[in-house]
Image: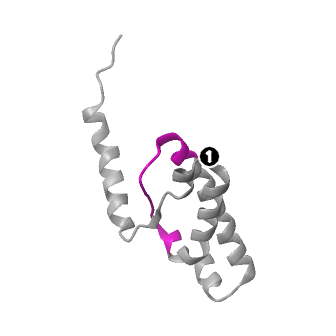
Amino acid sequence: EIIRRANQGELAAITALSETGRQIGRGLAAVVSAFNPKRLYIGGEITAAWEIIEPQIREALVENTLTEAARTTPVYPDTNPAEYRLLGAVALVAAPSFAALRVG
């Protein structure tokens, strides 16, 4: 609903999505600083507002990382978010089968 309203030009919805993008960017800055990935993918319904959130994500990366490589880490919208949700669900179900044995 918020994305639909933002696409219709509603200022409050655009502001909400911009702030969401900024917060996502702040979180990604921590990930980039800790793990130095070559690229990042964002999935989910939020990618329907990519043109609104991407500049905010990029700005937050620039402001919250220390190196030029971190600041320029490519960030892409994921075009297949449902597939990753399924993989995540499978991982949660399968995890106990691969967990280390309890000691003690």
Residue carrying label 1: 66
Q: Is residue 43 magenta?
A: yes
Circle 1: residue type: Leu
* 51 relative to 92, above or below: below
Q: Residue at x 29, y 50 (%)?
A: 90
**In the image, 84: left or right of 71?**
left
**In the image, 17: left or right of 91?**
right
Q: Is residue 78 magenta?
A: no
Image spot of residue 36 (x, y percent): 47, 45
Q: Which residues are magenta?
A: 30-47
Q: Residue at x 61, y 70 (%)?
A: 55
Q: Residue at x 59, y 83 (%)?
A: 4
Image spot of residue 44 (x, y percent): 46, 66
**In the image, 56: left or right of 99?**
right
Q: Quadrant of residue 15?
A: bottom right
Q: Quadrant of residue 63?
A: bottom right
